[in-house]
Image (spheres, helix red, strand yellow):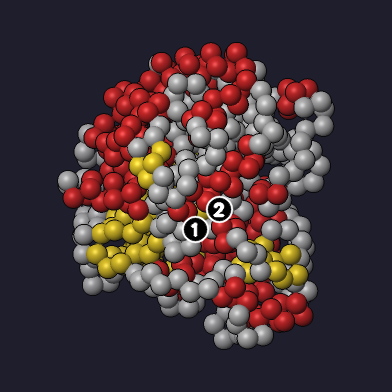
């Protein structure tokens, strides 16, 4: 499979994301004198309107910001309602929970799982507060000005892109059969004609425009303590939800220190738990002691896959809300522990379990400005359209991030009140000797750490520019020995046969979305930036 996009070279600033209209919104802000955070917020708010199957006002966000001197991390994830207990979930589901959801890639483990739709997996939306908090610390233009494109597209409409239309159609198939008052508003907002919009067909969401105006004018206060909060409280009480106005009023983002590992003389940065960024770091930590440059393609892919399996095994066992459970982050990233895990990589496909270290549907965007500030930001409602619960009159869906909780009472990530669940969305950042290289990310649930590993390896092992690294054919591991590969990878001579010989069960899927969508912006040594954006979907890439 060939992707013809070329990298963007820009002297003063760049915006890369999964939709051209959102990228253009960010660029317009840069041209008005805004900085990279301003541009990221304009892009992020516009994405909620032009790419609603993947993210919405009712979702969460995470961000890493290079301020010109150092990295800052923002955990914009919401917590579970105060009334949501394990016992309440089991009572509501007849005591058995739900079947594990395949999209989690094993995060739920075996046995009963959190339901995927409805009120039970709804957590407090953190995105509006995240937008405000990023702006409060780093923004330069007035907050309300950053919403102009998002409000305009919501109020006046826009033609739906081909990639979004396809994702929308797939998502509506998952809505079939959902009955109950909590789902009644969904079809009116997101399927007003009884189907998904077709490519080029205009779609409007004036209710979302009004909600965005309230957030913009109030600095998100209306969402958490005003009219929107009261409406959410009333809707949940009327339709069997656990979310309350008190839950919304108690919400806060958290500024955190990013964590990193070394890889090929660089530092790869992720945010600490409850995100799954540790899975990418753990895999890269293992791979840094293995040769990838001078081995045949089947061995290169095999080693990467096995390292990713080890990273996921540990992440799924240990990652939880660090405010509520002891997460051994430092121990997991210890070089001695990485060496012990590396020794488990053999010439055969394995099914690793977690180690025991010593205790001690999503959108992605990145921006850069003329002053050297760079932003890596990701936001999501999780599975397509999240919980499928839409607040009547306000035009947005609530996320289903509570699906990331476990029902195993012995697990650190067990569902509990006022707790953040295991999160799949992860922004990344690359530095070398403490100096910025740039932001990167690959969205797509369980694919995200795997995409980070493959993008970083393509860049540092393969010497590819960001666009070529993003376009390189990918593989995707879900569970067991099953391995999906893109057609371009399967076409490499001897690769599939070599992977089969090592015990992998290889298949080539017809739908490319399983391999995720990514963006990256690297700082050029001679000044300016070189950037890439996803060619598998309607990626937007602009600069000036």
Q: Name above or below for residue 9 compared with residue 149.
A: below
Q: Name above or below for residue 390 compared with residue 174.
A: above
- Residue 61 at what x, y percent from top left? 46, 41
Identify residue for label 2.
444
Return the mark for residue 517: 1
- Residue 119 at what x, y percent from top left? 63, 26
- Residue 163 at what x, y percent from top left? 47, 54
Decide: marks 1, 2 in contact (CB < 8 A)?
Answer: yes
C-alpha separation, residue under disc 1 versus residue under disc 2 = 7 Å
Tell me where residue 349 sits by quadrant: bottom right
- Residue 204 at what x, y percent from top left? 39, 34
Q: Residue at x 70, y 49 (%)?
A: 102
Q: Residue at x 23, y 48 (%)?
A: 28
Secondary structure of the residue carrying numbered label 2: loop
Observer able to see residue 424: no
Observer able to see residue 505: yes
Q: Is residue 378 left or right of residue 46?
A: right
Return the residue nearer the eye: 303 or 9: 9
Return the mark for residue 379: none
Tell me where residue 400 sits by quadrant: top right
Secondary structure of the residue carrying numbered label 1: strand
Q: Is residue 408 left or right of residue 217?
A: right
Along the polypeptide, which appears first: circle 1 or circle 2?
A: 2
Return the residue nearer the eye: 191 or 345: 191
State the quadrant of the C terminus.
bottom left
Q: Residue at x 57, y 79 (%)?
A: 292
Q: Name above or below for residue 185 compared with residue 59.
A: above
Circle 1 crowding by C-alpha within 10 Å: few under 14, some 14–19, many from 20? many
Q: Residue at x 42, y 53 (%)?
A: 18
Residue ranking furthest to the left: 32
């Amino acid at each position: 499979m060939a992707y013809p996009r070329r990298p963007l070279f820009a002297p003063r600033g760049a915006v890369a994301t999964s939709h051209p209209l959102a990228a253009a919104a960010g660029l317009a802000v840069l041209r008005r004198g805004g900085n990279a955070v301003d541009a990221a917020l304009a892009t992020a708010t516009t994405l909620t309107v032009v790419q609603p199957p993947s993210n919405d006002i009712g979702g969460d966000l995470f961000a890493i910001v290079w301020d010109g001197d150092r990295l800052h991390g923002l955990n914009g994830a919401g917590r579970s309602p105060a009334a949501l207990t394990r016992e309440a979930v089991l009572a509501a589901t007849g005591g058995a929970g739900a079947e594990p959801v395949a999209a989690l890639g094993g995060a739920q483990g075996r046995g009963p799982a959190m339901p995927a739709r409805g009120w039970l997996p709804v957590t407090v939306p953190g995105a509006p507060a995240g937008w405000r908090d990023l702006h409060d610390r780093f923004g330069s233009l007035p907050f309300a000005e950053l919403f102009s494109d998002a409000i305009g597209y919501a109020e006046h409409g826009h033609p739906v892109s081909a990639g979004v239309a396809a994702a929308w159609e797939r998502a509506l198939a998952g809505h079939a059969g959902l009955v109950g008052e909590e789902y009644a508003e969904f079809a009116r907002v997101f399927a007003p004609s009884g189907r998904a919009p077709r490519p080029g067909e205009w779609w409007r969401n004036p209710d979302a425009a009004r909600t965005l105006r309230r957030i913009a004018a109030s600095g998100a206060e209306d969402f958490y303590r005003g009219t929107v909060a009261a409406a959410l409280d009333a809707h949940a009480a009327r339709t069997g939800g656990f979310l309350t106005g008190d839950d919304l009023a108690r919400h806060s983002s958290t500024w955190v220190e990013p964590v990193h590992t070394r890889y090929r003389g660089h530092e790869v940065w992720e945010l600490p738990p409850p995100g799954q960024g540790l899975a990418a770091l753990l895999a890269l930590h293992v791979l840094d002691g293995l040769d990838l440059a001078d081995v045949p393609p089947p061995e290169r892919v095999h080693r990467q896959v096995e390292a990713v399996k080890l990273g996921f095994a540990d992440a799924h066992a240990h990652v939880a809300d660090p405010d509520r459970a002891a997460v051994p982050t430092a121990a997991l990233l210890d070089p001695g522990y990485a060496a012990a895990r590396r020794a488990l990589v053999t010439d055969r496909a394995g099914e690793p379990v977690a180690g025991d270290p010593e205790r001690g549907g999503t959108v992605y965007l990145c921006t850069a400005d003329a002053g050297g500030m760079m932003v890596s930001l990701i936001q999501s409602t999780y599975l397509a359209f999240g919980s499928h619960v839409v607040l009547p009159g306000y035009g947005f869906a609530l996320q289903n991030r509570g699906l990331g909780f476990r029902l195993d009472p012995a697990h650190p990530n067990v569902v509990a009140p006022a707790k953040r669940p295991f999160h799949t969305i992860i922004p990344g950042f690359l530095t070398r000797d403490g100096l910025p290289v740039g932001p990167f990310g690959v969205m797509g649930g369980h694919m995200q750490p795997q995409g980070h590993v493959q993008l970083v390896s393509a860049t540092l092992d393969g010497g590819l520019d960001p666009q070529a690294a993003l376009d390189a054919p990918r593989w995707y591991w879900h569970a067991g020995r099953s391995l999906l590969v893109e057609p371009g990878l399967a076409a490499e001579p001897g690769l599939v046969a070599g992977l089969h010989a090592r015990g992998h069960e290889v298949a080539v899927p017809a739908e490319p979305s399983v391999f995720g969508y990514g963006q990256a912006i690297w700082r050029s040594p001679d000044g300016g930036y070189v950037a890439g954006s996803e060619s598998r979907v309607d990626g937007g890439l602009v600069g000036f």
